[in-house]
Image: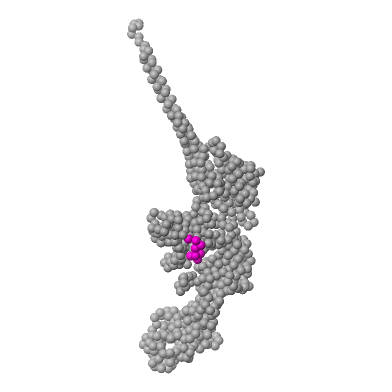
Amino acid sequence: MNLKLKKGFTLVEVMASVTLLVMAMGLALSGYMFSLKNVNQADVQNELDMDVQLTMERLKKDLRLSSLDAMFYFPSGAGPYKALSFPLAEDSDGDGILETDAIGKILWDETVIYHIRPTTPNQLVKTTFKPRDNSLSDAQRQAQLESVVKYGHGSSTYNSQNATSKMIFENLLEWEINPKSGRFDAYSPALTRDSSSLGYILLDPGEHKFTFKVIDKNRNSGGYKIGLDQLFVSPSYSEREAEAQLPATAQSGATAISRYMPVGSWKGNHHLVFPATSVGNSFTLTLNNDQWEETNFGALGYAAEDTEFIFDETLTPKDNIVQLRGNDITWEASEQTGSLIGTSISNTTLKGTTVAVHINGAELLTNGNWTVYNGKKCKLTFQANATGRLQVKNVYIGKTTSTEKTVFSLDGAPKNARFSGSSESGIMMAGATETSDWIDFEINTTNNYIVVFKIKDDSDKCFPMAWENQYSPNDCVVAGNPTNHIIGLKSITASYPESGTYTSQIFDTHLSKPRYGDLSWNAQSPPGTALSFKVRTGSNPDLSDATNWESTSASSVNPRSVGASYKRYIQFQTLLQSNPGADYTTTPKLKDITIDWGGERQLVDIGGIFTKGPDYGMFEIQVDGNPLRSALIVDLEIYDEILTMDHESLKVTSSLKIELTPRNSGK
């Protein structure tokens, strides 16, 4: 073997190889360390994300069973807050239904406080007092919260013997709790209305000041106006007409007024307008915690007997009212016959003839129910045709029990009609009408009547208008012979009835035993007319357990004590009486009625129906200087620090901001 042909690695080659190997191992180790750092950062991030999610889910679960009206915050004041105390409802049998007391209020079983314990690192802690001491006052409840925040546990405050604390997680953290305030953006390209709930507030009995303040405007809006149609500000959910609450208790920047809205669906055809010009303009209304204000009438369940509710444009301001029904045309020949125009009969043989017209007022088997109003007195109107003059005499009206229209049997003595004090009418020119004086004869829509008269025995005054019957013949008899025309008699006018009643819907106070106060009203009562009221209450929604109206006493004293038994459901009945001295042609007009009671301290959902338009702004509501709260906004951030490959500190964070809405209100 030739040893000269054998070759090995030189020292240089070995050193180069070692260098390359070291470099490769260094690169591999660097890659491993980089991956390890990334894995560590991802693990930390995942852990933080999980803590945030689990914490928020825990809060959601607890707060869902709580109530905004029973919450306390730290620090006290307007916020933001760092700790929260709230009650949890009891479900002792695990059936998913919260337990309630004898009057239906939720039984709060425990108090929960979420707070931060300032250790290193911080701890988010849940301190629980179970069973809850429901005898604590609001001040004691706030002091309990402040003690837990100060000491980090519940061992140094009220109900300490039932306190336990549990750490939710331990880490560096920041959080804020902010109640969501009630605000409304009233911008809309077109004038319209919108119903909205703006939030909750705890109200004591008595009067409260509701302040509406402009806070901004939509970028598309041309102004800052506020418009209110109706307000919902009571535990009983009663509707309040916003314009009825004027004048404003206080205002700045503009003056709140009532504006007539003839077009659209604004309740009462009015709304309250505050023509604000800038952010910060405000007005304040003073409203009672709870009462029933009836201003529009006609709610589902009302009953009107010889009364009606109308929008009266003769009043200033125009208003919805209740009044007696009538003082208008109750019967027309054109309606009973279906001949809307009438025809001219040029027949001088009618002179000196007697005409009897059957008034189909009652619910006859055929062609009945043509009278519209009841009235204590009546008038008769006659009409000449287009071709000649007319004069009638010996005019009578009587009630009949006969349904056979060619056999006129009177029920009682007929009454004579006079014209300007005379026994016969004046001469009606061609196409003209003449109406009798008031006849002391009552019209009732359930009866049939006969009008008998004689056409003047004069060939120049015997041209009555005639209406041909389109439904059935024989509504009229001329000289003893049936005819399919109604001759001469154009219409009957009824005065108002002597009296009528309006019975309201049944109102739910949402209290088992409300202590009713006064009933008061606003009305227009012409001389000789009268208004009186009855009130009854009951525990059943249909008032089947209430006293009947016949046994309930009426009162015309304004205001008057309700004086009814203290039961949940309430109803009123109004008796309206006309003036006999004015031939029953005047009626009282009831504009509104209010019934109040001593309410209870309750959480109230504040909202309303608000006007929206192209020049309307954004506003918020405060009650007695306190903002509304519709939910809780919780903003939680957890963070940790890790070292980078460059040995620098890297902050890893996880945050979540959610809106939590408690579902219970304590009742």
Residue 12: give x, y in percent of width and height. 36, 14
Relative height, residue 616 to residue 590 (above, below): above
Quadrant assignment for the N terminus = top left
Residue under the point 62% across and 51% down: 137
Q: Is residue 327 magenta?
A: no
State the residue in front, 553 or 28: 553
Quadrant in the picture for residue 2: top left
State the residue in front, 263 or 477: 263
Residue 49: give x, y in percent of width and height. 49, 39
Relative height, residue 296 to residue 233 (above, below): below
Residue 357: give x, y in percent of width and height. 47, 85
Residue under the point 51% across and 45% down: 176
The figure's colour scheme reads one colour
Residue 21 is left or right of residue 559, and the answer is left
Residue under the point 56% across and 46% down: 74
Region rendered in magenta = 243-251
Residue 225: give x, y in percent of width and height. 43, 60
In this rendering, does residue 421 appear at all?
Answer: yes
In this rendering, does residue 358 appear at all?
Answer: no
Relative height, residue 514 to residue 75 (above, below): below
Quadrant assignment for the C terminus = bottom right
State the residue in front, 3 or 69: 69
